Each structure stands twice: as structure tokens, then as C-alpha cells.
Image (spheres, grey):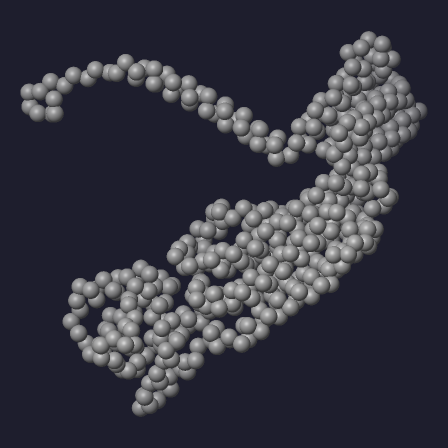
Amino acid sequence: MNGKKGSIEINIPPITNTKLSENKKCGEVSAPGKGWILSIWEFCKEDSNRVVFSLKVGLAILLVSLLILCRAPYQVFGSSIIWSILTVAIMFEYTVGATFNRGFNRALGSLLAGILAIAIAELALSMGRIAEPIIIALSIFIVGTVTSFMKLWPSLVPYEYGFRVILFTYCLIIVSGYRMGNPIRTAMDRLYSIAIGAIVAVLVNVLVFPIWAGEQLHKELVSNFNSVADALEECVRKYLDDDESEHPEFTKTVMDKFPDEPAYRKCQSMLNSSAKLESLANSAKWEPPHGRFQHFFYPWSEYVKVGAVLRYCAYEVMALHGVLHSEIQAPCNLRITFQKEIQDATSDAAELVRCLGKDICEMQRSLKASLLKRVHSSTESLQRAIDMHSYLLTSTYEPPDSNPSKPQPKLSLTLSTTLSNLSNPLAEVPEPNSNTPSQPLGTIPPLQTESYHEMMRKQSRRLYSWPSREVDAFEEEGGFSTDFIPKMRALESTATLSLATFTSLLIEFVARLDHLVEAVDELSKMSQFKQEAL
């Protein structure tokens, strides 16, 4: 039974295997369907307006289709009513402003194409049956060339859809009119059908749960303010709480895009939303006064300007996250030295950013002089702390003289302790009161036979030294080499440079807040926000 010679192995399948396999197969079939349903649910839950928009499009298509399904309107308009369905499908957009913009281009393009088609068709008829197709073909070539060139002109790019409408509407009208023999009648039927589809699309989009582009732009900008403030606080908190226990490689962390930091991901997505803000602003210009935006010619372009200044602040936060996740890190005790000043500057700056976002959200103008003064005060405190403790960011060691007759200078206690921690974190530093005989720092110990513990110590240096490096000549020979002290001095300076870079980026972020406050004040003035004291 256990594989011995002469044994007989009998395999009796359990009774429940068949049922388990069937259940497993059923689970394999139902799991993808369940995941698909959950993904749709999450997509709809993220923005409920997506469901509303889909239902509105279906309603508009249904209303236009009734003109064909019902006999009375079909006898009036005929088969040309199919253009109404095409107009609704093309013209209906997510927001009201985008629908008005698309409708304007559609109406103007169809009108110009209809007038031009009637004029060219009448001219071709007057030239006779032989010249008529030649003139029509030549006009199609000219219209296609001119409209395609004009929609590429920089100042006419916003009306690119209108030129496309001119092209295909002109071609369809003049070709169908040539075959039917009555271009004027054909053009008028097309224009009537397009007008019906446009009216239905606009009425459904405006009257049935309207989705305003201005409101979307307003909410998007406020959300960006909160994302920047959250990402800043999250980055500084992680930087100060880091105990150097684990430092993943920067390339691997960048590839993963810091999956454990949701605030960072929001800030990163905000940097890619510039095109979205510009599109919403262009669509909002076409919308009539609505909701909280009750006056004409609302300055939607100022929202784009504020968003551009806010993105510069987000770039500084992204740079702070880069320092946080880099392999070069300052010692933990050095970061603790400036912990209070960094936390004060961060909390005040984040509070100011949230205050600006709240002002835009509530459409009010608050007096932020005291808050801005407090931000500057905390930043100046951080700068003074760095100036007062600048000796911690630099080394007091002077490079050795080239003359070999002069004695080697001694290392300071602070530098030697830091170097020992950087190069050999597992080695124990002897206590000053230990009974072991002390030895001057600059002397070279005698050569000794390498023991097992010494080999393990060297191996640990290879594994845990920063940056990762092979054992140099000093470690192999057990003595000081000529270039050992400059190398370790460079390691210490590079590590402390990480803290200096982090604090300088934080100070630069605060400096950009002045421009952000000015942009928000300009927006509040032009948008006529109500005045309210903070």
C-alpha cells in the first residue's frame, strides 16, 4: 500500500468528487459574470450621471423614432425623417454646454451646406445635362479640399465639427438632388429633419435632469484643491514616520506608482486633467445662466487659470513624493530634528489650500491675510531651523593634505558615528565606559588573521551598506586607505542632501501658494463671489 514491492494499490474515487468538480465548474462560469456585474456597478456608482445620460439619449432617440413609426408624421416628412435620428445620435453630448456647442456647429454647417448645394445645383442645371455632372463633381472636390484645410487652421479648430458637417451634408444633398431631379426640395427636407432632431436633443438634455458643464468644472476644481492638500499631508507624514526599516528600490516603486498612497494617485490624476478642465470651460461658455451661475458671460476661463497654478503646486508635491521614495534617505534622527517645523509648515499650507478650495466651493471671498501670514511664519521658522542647524547638513572634515609627512587629521565623533552607521549598521559601537582599551581614531590597527565572525561582518556590509557596493581595499586589508575618508564623506553628504532637498521643495510649495491666492482672488472678483470674513 505504501509503494512496497508486491503491494496492490486500489484507488477508490470519493463520491463527492463529481459534485465538487461540477460545483467548481459552475463557479468558474459564474465568477466572470459576477465580476462583470460588479465592475459595471462600480462604474455607475462612481458617477451616477453616466446612467442618467444614457437614459436621456435613449429617450431622445425614441421620441424621434416615433415620427417614423407613426404613420401621420411619416406621410408628411417621408424617408427624410431618418436624418432626425442621425442628428440626435451625433449631437447629443454628455453636458448641456457641449450639446449646445455641437448643435450650433451642426445647425450652421447644415444651413451653409444647404444654401451652397442649392446654388451649385441650380448653376449645374442651367449648364445642361452634359456639364451638370462635371460641375457637381468639381464642386464636391473644391468643397472637400477647402473644408478640410480650414478645419486645420489654429483659430478654427473649435469649429472642426462644423466643417465636417458642411462637407458630408453638402455631398449628400447635391448627389441625392442630382438623382431625384429636385435639389431644392431635397435640401429643404434635409434641413427640416435636422432641425427636428436638434430641437428634440436640446429639449431632452436641458429639461430632463440636466448635466451642466459649469457645475462639473466647479466640482472638478474644488476636488483638485483637496487632492493636493491630502497628498501633501500624506507625503510629509510618511517621510517623518519613516524609521528606515524598509527602502524599496525607486525604479520598482515608480513602476508600481506607489499603490499604497491613494492621495498621491488622486494628485497624479489631477495633473492629467488639464485637457478636461479646458473642455469643460469651453462647453460651459455655451450654457445659459443656471443654478448658482446666474449672470451671463461667466468667467469660466478663470477656472482654467486657477487650475494651471494649482498644477504647479501639485508638481512640487510630486517631487516631494519622489524624495520620499528614493533610495537616498537622510538618517531618521536627522529628520526628527526638524520634525516640528516641517509639520507646522505642512499643516498650515494644507489648511490654506483647503480654505481656497472651500471659498471656490461656497462661492465666497474670505479674508485670508491672517492664514497666509501664519503660513509664511511657519515657513520662516523652518528656514531658521535649517540655518541654525546647518552644521548637521555638512561635514566638518577637511580633506587630507597631499604631503605624506604630515599626520592624518582625526575625524570628529559625529562624523565617525554617522559613517559607522551608514557603512556597517549591524556592527556594534563600543561604549565610552567599556573596559576595552581605547585606540585613537586615526591609527591603523595591526593585521590579524581573518576569523569567521570577521567574514560574516564583511558579508553584512555588502548586503546592508548604502549604496550597495562591493567590499573595497580598506575592508579587505583591514586598514585605512587613502581615499576611504573622502568616499564616506561623500556618502554622508549625499544622505543629508536628501533632507535639504525635501525641505527646499516644501518651501518652494509654500512660495507658489502666493500665486495661487492671487489667482483665486481674481476668480472671486470676476465671478462676483460674496464677501465673508474668515
Q: Position of residue 124 (x, y in %)?
A: 89, 26
In which quadrant of the rendered view does residue 410 lie?
Answer: bottom left
Q: Is residue 296 above or below residue 166?
A: below
At a point 39% along the width and 75% down the height, the residue shown is 415
Closest to the observer, 132 or 313? 313
Q: Is residue 76 above or below residue 131?
A: above
Left or right: residue 122 versus residue 368 is right
Q: Position of residue 217 (x, y in %)?
A: 72, 43
Q: Position of residue 58 (x, y in %)?
A: 71, 22
Left or right: residue 402 versus residue 66 is left
Q: Position of residue 226 (x, y in %)?
A: 64, 49
Q: Is residue 129 above or below residue 430?
A: above
Q: Quadrant of the C terminus?
A: bottom right
User: Do we see residue 449 in this rendering?
Assistant: yes
Closest to the observer, 161 or 17? 17
In the displayed orientation, state which residue is furthest to the right. 126
In the displayed orientation, state which residue is furthest to the top. 71
Q: Quadrant of the N terminus?
A: top left
In the displayed orientation, state which residue is furthest to the bottom. 405
Q: How many marks?
A: 0
At a point 35% along the width and 75% down the height, the residue shown is 416
User: Do we see residue 141 in this rendering?
Assistant: no
Closest to the observer, 511 or 283? 511
